[in-house]
Image (tube, grey):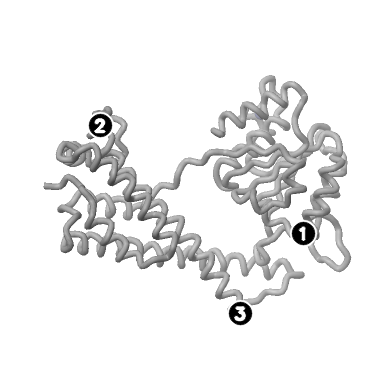
Amino acid sequence: MRPETARELVSDAFRRGRMAHAYLLAGSPRGAAGELAVHILQMLACGQDEPPCGACERCRQVAGRAWCDNLWVAPRKKSRAISIEQMRRTEGSRMPPPYLLSWLGKTSFAGGWKAAVLEGADRLNEAAANALLKMLEEPPPWTLLLLLSDAPQALPATILSRCQRLDLDEPPPGLDEPWRSQVLAVLAGPPLSGPVAAMAAAQRLAAVLEAMKKRAGELVRAESHADEAQAEEEADEPVRVGSPAGEEEMEAWIGARYREMRTALLLTMQRWFRDLLALRAGADPAVAHCREHLATLQERARRLTLAQALANVESIEDLARQMERNLPEQALLEYWLDRLADGAA
Ligand SMILES: [Zn+2]
């Protein structure tokens, strides 16, 4: 559902005093799910007539994660898990309080609602999930739990069944510069099909993918160094640096980040061919995504049949599927480009 719909749903339940004890906000913790969580927390804390006002001292504290009756819990950096030590005091742990379950069990500081947020709730380990489940079965009054996850299928069914789930639509990822311009320059450039042209265009697109791989590696390694520094502060978690398992994990994270970037590239190409199709079908040019190349798009659309324009859009979906199978990217691109009807003269 659209984030505004979810927001309205929860606000309405709040006004009628019928809120669930726990919501699963299925979406990106850094995106739609995180934003909705802040909105809900502000609604609970804001003292104004039509909460949340978004501007009062309380609303500001909530947004800054500084409000006394909110607790945010995230997976620990090194283990990437939410552990039982974060749920309650445990024997031998040097993890400092507050612990989520003990914290929720105490009365509110400001005299209203207490709310806890679990970011990346799919990272709950088994012991932590079991402890949480007990609380969900008998939630303390005036408490709310928000579980944020972009992989809700990874949560135990027992937890899922005790949360009201809100699946949030996310806007598709955009392609960063200079890559977007580079990709559009290839598409708007000389004809793409034919063996020689396809090979040249595939090389240029493969160079963009290569740059993405490198960038993904840099980003993940930089984040991981920051994590290791924090993990050393979390004294009860031994730090393993450079172990074979660590390297394998690192490669997996880099791969995942790279595939996100590649998806954004494919989406940009798809928008190009959707524009061609829309223009060929007589749509308003104002709906075009790649407006900076509108003249080129309009000229090319005139040279395509409707069937060709539609086949292009479908072919890029095939290309995306084949890339998911880890076939050689440059060869896939070349094969795909060679068969396009791009309308270039
Ligand atoms: Zn307010």
Residue at the spot x=75%, y=47% of the render?
A: 159
Up-down relation of residue 46 to residue 144 (above or below): above
- Mark 2 or 1 closer to N-term? 1
- In this view, the residue in front, 40 or 259, is 259
Task: Specify whether residue 220 is in view.
Answer: yes
Residue at the spot x=18%, y=38% of the render?
A: 295
Up-down relation of residue 331 to residue 102 (above or below): below
- In the visual, does 148 lie left or right of 182? right
Dot 1 crowding, Cα within 10 Å, few <14, some 14–19, many 20+: some
When asked about the image quadrant of residue 333, the answer is bottom left
- The local secondary structure at tag 2 comes to loop
Task: Specify whether residue 68 is in view.
Answer: no
Q: Disc 2 marks which amino acid?
A: Ala
Residue at the spot x=62%, y=69% of the render?
A: 228
Q: Residue 322 at what x, y percent from top left?
A: 39, 59
- In this view, the residue in front, 6 or 224, is 6
Q: Residue 7 at what x, y percent from top left?
A: 61, 30
Image quadrant of ligand 1 equals top right
Q: Which residue is mark 2?
A: 281
When asked about the image quadrant of residue 9, the answer is top right
- In the visual, does 23 lie left or right of 250? right
Q: Which residue is mark 3?
A: 243
**Which quadrant of the figure contains the N terminus?**
top right
* Farthest residue, direction front: 307
Q: Disc 1 marks which amino acid?
A: Glu
